[in-house]
Amino acid sequence: MEKKRKLSLPAWIFIGMLAGILIGLLFTKNPDFTTEWIKPIGMIYINLLKFLVVPVVLFSIADGVISLNDLKRVGSVGLKTFVYYMFTTAIAVVIGLVLVNIFKGAFPVLPSAELDTLEYEAKEAPSVMSVIVGIFPDNLFKPMVNADMLPVIVIAILTGAGVLAAGEKGQRIATIISDMNDVVMKIMMMIIKLTPIGVFCLMINVVAVNGASIVGTLAVVIGVAYLGYLTHVIIVYGLSVRFLAGMNPLKFFKGLAPAMICAFTTTSSNATLPLNIECCNKMGAEPEISSFVLPLGATINMDGTAIYQAVAAVFIACCYNINLTIGDMAMIVLTATLASIGTAGVSGAGMIMLAMVLTTIGIPVAGIAIIAGVDKIFDMGRTTLNITGDATCALFISRLERQKAAKAAAKAGK
């Protein structure tokens, strides 16, 4: 008797998302019910994912550094990763600016009386130097308690480097770190199995609360942002996967589907990190590379957020009837690219970056209030784009390292 074929996890996640959308539409007139009773179940799932983030980053990066077995190689991989992330982020801002300038004629100019009533209290954007100083922790446990990823990454890298520098004596610690990483990955797989339920509950609430908000003038700016996301995915990531990672783009997107759906519903790069690592490893990324590149990407690679900022900045400028110069556009590219380094991989962090960009080009920060109500809709797309970019980098760097190892082996064999 032929065994019944079970549905895969990605299929269940997709079913959960579709079911959540359909049921959410039924609650658009009564979103308070979903917020009070259904969203908390989704939040339990998010909390479990967030609980995993620090141990995953700490042990996977430390184990990845130890597995690289050479501090020079760690530096080499880190530099390539950083250059790739900054390059794609700069392209993302340019794509956003080109598209928003094409469609800006459809954006409204709001009456001054309406603009005067706008209020938005922006969280203070950190200066470049404060971000750099903040990367280096003054306390071992504080970054872990606060889930402050950049210092946690530094702690993990230094731990791995210390183990390598200790030589034979460090091997016992290396074994403990490797074992802890295996344990954390097992816990991760248990939590990932709950993804369809988490996605289902979160999507119901998102649609119930925001469904009606999509209609109206904001639909245009949301549409432009999503057009930017799709353009970046198809052109930049498609070409990167095909020519840099040497992989069929369709196979890549199919393999990454679980992580993309998770990012779309949780709107958190950090919460999606465990699932992203699992997907990339299944697609052939080297585990030590994905363990190093993906946590770093969840913190500093924000292509979706960069597109969002370019689109939102021009939209808000149009609402205030402010014409941006070429110099202003260049400042948006520069500020958005640099700001992405210090943005946390958590839901809503893009608003802080947007406040920084608006301040730089002299647009009233209160204008954020115009789009704040539908930021969740922007956030769903931009987070999905962010984690997709992280995955393309992991596969690209993995291929580079395999080629490097093959050349070294061939040279040694001569």
Image (tube, helix red, strand yellow):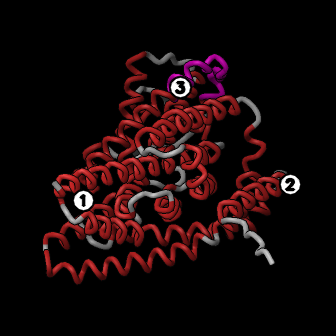
Give the percent coordinates (x, y) of residue 125.
39, 44
Give the percent coordinates (x, y) of residue 33.
79, 63
Position above or below: 229 against 24: above
Position above or below: 25 against 183: above
- Name the amino acid, label 3: Val
Q: Name the residue nearer the viewer: 206 or 168.
A: 168
Give the percent coordinates (x, y) of residue 386.
49, 47
Q: Is residue 205 visible?
A: no
Distance CA(mark 3)–CA(mark 2) = 35 Å
Which secondary structure class fits the magenta region best?
Answer: helix
Q: Which tag, 1 or 3, sits closer to the chain's start?
A: 1
Q: Residue at x 65, y 25 (%)?
A: 113
> Element at badge 3?
helix
Q: Which tag, 3 or 2, sits closer to the chain's start?
A: 2
Residue indicated by mark 1: 136
- Name the amino acid, label 2: Leu
- Name the amino acid, label 1: Phe
Task: Give the image quarter of residue 409.
Answer: bottom left
CB under 8 Å between discs 1 and 3: no
> Element at badge 1?
loop
How crowded is the residue under tag 1: few (<14 C-alpha within 10 Å), some, or many (20+)?
some
Distance CA(mark 1)–CA(mark 3) = 35 Å
- Magenta span includes 101: yes
Range of residues picked out in magenta = 96-115
Distance CA(mark 2)–CA(mark 1) = 49 Å
Task: Give the image quarter of residue 62.
Answer: bottom left
